[in-house]
Amino acid sequence: MKKKLLALVLAAAMALSLAACGGSASSQPAASTPPADAPSAPAEPAAEPLTFKVSYAESEDSIFGQVINAAFEKITAETDGRLVFEIYANNQLGSITDMLEQMRAGAPMICSMGFDNLGDLVPDFAPASFPYVFNDLYEVQALAKSDWIANIESQLVSLDVQPMCYGAIGYRHFISTFPISSAADCKGHIMRMGPSAAAQGFITVMDGTPTTTTWADNYSLLQTGVIESCEAPLSLLLSSSLNEVCDYLCLSGHFVNPFSLCINPSYWQQISPEDQAVVKSVLADACVEMADKAMESEADFIQQFKDLGVTVSEADKASFGAVVPELFKLLELDPGIYDDIRAAIDANK
């Protein structure tokens, strides 16, 4: 009896031991808790910021430079440093044409492009840079909201150009070594314009001789008589001290100087949708601010030219506008595009 009792006790002890261990072969051991002082797993390294070179023709102390520089600083702050920008004013990295070629080839750049420059890529866009298409600077913002510009933008993207905003720097006027008051006065004179077909063609249809130069060379070229006139917003003409080599300023206001800040689409796609929204919002606000400042300062700049001894004259704008149909013919463009642009602007005011 003692032996049987001992066997039963041993069997019961073994059964209890198996139950405590879970008994099943498929049971998993409980996860162990690391000691409180165990080192934590290393954090994921922060992603490197995307860095872009920003190139434009104006000086940093111009209205354009001040507003755009502040805008890019704001973008860096609002994206917590994920987007960083290096500013190169005064075409330090080369001409607009050079910058456009580099950007399209894949350089990490943001370039300020005139509508006329982009019109050389997409011809239907060229008339948006023609004389007197816009009645004021703010109409550029209206066009930017239109389906018409969306169609143009899709064509530009296919050519490796992604516009990020649309704005206007200010009205462009002629400064010269000879008096200008009408289109007829341009006949036979060498006049510096931007490199686009639209800008060069504008002088051609007025029977002038168009040429293009690096902006930094204009002072010496006007001084030596190689060129006789150039045009730009008043802020740029004044900051370049062209009043020292030119006696005449014609308030033609032939262009509102529309521009777009552009990037290669491959880099735009590397920016998150959230940061893209920040970029577009900040730059859109900057374009409105720029237009405001340009309008506020126009009269002041005119007075400064007068105070510096420059003869300032109002232009016969009707005479300049009268050559626009010839510009359409020269560039072999449909004049109906003008009506499409005006309709797009009026629908989005």
Image (cartoon, rainbow, N blue to C red):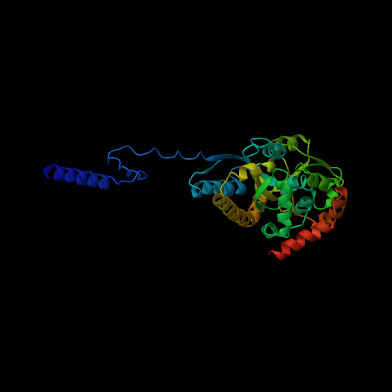
Q: Work out whether 119 lies above or below 40.
A: below
Of all residues shown, which one is farthest toward the left?
A: 2
Residue 250, image x, y percentages: 75, 51
Task: Identify the residue at horizontal 87%, vertical 46% (top origin).
Answer: 207
Of all residues shown, which one is farthest toward the front?
A: 1
Q: Classify residue 284 as left or right of residue 316.
A: left
Residue 194, image x, y percentages: 75, 43
Task: Identify the residue at horizontal 30%, vertical 40% (top origin).
Answer: 34
Residue 301, image x, y percentages: 65, 51
In this rendering, the count of numbered labels is 0
Q: Quadrant of the N terminus?
A: top left
Q: Which residue is more in the foreground, 304 or 234? A: 234
Q: Which residue is more in the foreground, 198 or 108? A: 108
Task: Identify the residue at horizontal 33%, vertical 46% (top origin).
Answer: 24
Residue 18, image x, y percentages: 26, 45
Q: Which residue is more in the foreground, 296 or 244? A: 296
Q: Is residue 248 visible?
A: no
Residue 96, quarter of the rendered image: top right
Q: Quadrant of the C terminus?
A: bottom right
Q: Which residue is more in the foreground, 90 or 262? A: 262
Q: Is residue 199 visible?
A: yes
Q: Work out whether 269 lies above or below 137.
A: above
Q: Classify residue 47 as left or right of residue 135.
A: left
Residue 95, quarter of the rendered image: top right
